[in-house]
Image: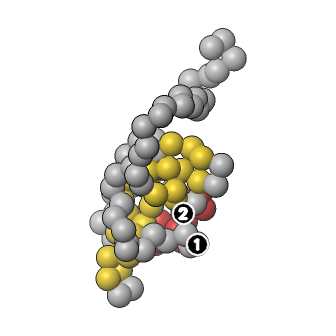
Amino acid sequence: AILLSVGLIQSAHIETKSEQTGFVVPRGAIIRFRGSDWVYVRAGPGAFERRLLESPVPEADGFFVAKGLSVGEEVVVRGAAALFAAEQSAPGAAL
């Protein structure tokens, strides 16, 4: 613990025998903002909404998310940073 500074994150894994259902979100799809992980999900033609990932678990190819996403939803896996920049530069955006 002495080697960890304030704000650094260390992950740990605990193996369990129970199965969990969910999704693995690619690392490139995730935006880190205000200490939380977010993804953009298609909300309609040309429309996207930023959605909070609840308790994402690091995996080899991304982050496992057990809730917050549904089968059939389209998650932005390329260009998420551009969507975030556009959202933050929009008039009235909360920085």
**Residue found at x 32% / y 76%:** 43
Dot 2 corresponds to which residue? 29
Q: Quadrant of residue 45?
A: bottom left
| Residue at 49% across, 71% down | 76
Q: Is mark 2 on a helix, strand or loop?
A: helix
Q: Residue at x 52, y 56 (%)?
A: 24
At label 2, the amino acid type is Ala
> In this view, which residue lies farthest toward the bottom?
45
Establish if 30 lies above or below 60: below
Mark 2 burial class by Cα count in 10 Å: few <14, some 14-19, many 20+: many
Q: Position of residue 25 (x, y in %)?
A: 52, 59
- 91 or 42: which is nearer to us? 42
Residues 18 and 49: in front is: 18
State which tag comes first along the sequence, 1 or 2.
2
Q: In the rendered image of this protein, does residue 8 appear above or below residue 86?
A: above
Q: Quadrant of residue 3?
A: top right
**Which amino acid is tagged 1?**
Arg
Q: Return the residue nearer the eye: 77 or 92.
A: 77
Q: In this view, does 11 lie above or below 46?
A: above
**Is 77 positioned to the left or the right of 34 in the image?**
right
Q: Is residue 82 left or right of residue 53?
A: right
Q: In which quarter of the image is the N terminus?
A: top right
Horizontal relation, residue 83 to residue 61: left or right: left
Residue 61 visible somewhere in the drawing: yes
Q: Where is residue 92 in the image (x, y as percent from the top left)?
A: 30, 66
Q: Residues within 10 Å of mark 1 (few under 14, many from 20)?
A: few
Seen at 57% across and 60% down, the residue is 26
Percent position of residue 44, x then y:
32, 82
Disc 1, disc 2: CB below 8 Å? no
Instruction: Return the x and y of residue 35 as percentages of the image width and height.
Output: 46, 41
**Can you identify the residue that label 1 sits on?**
78
C-alpha span from label 1 to label 2: 6 Å
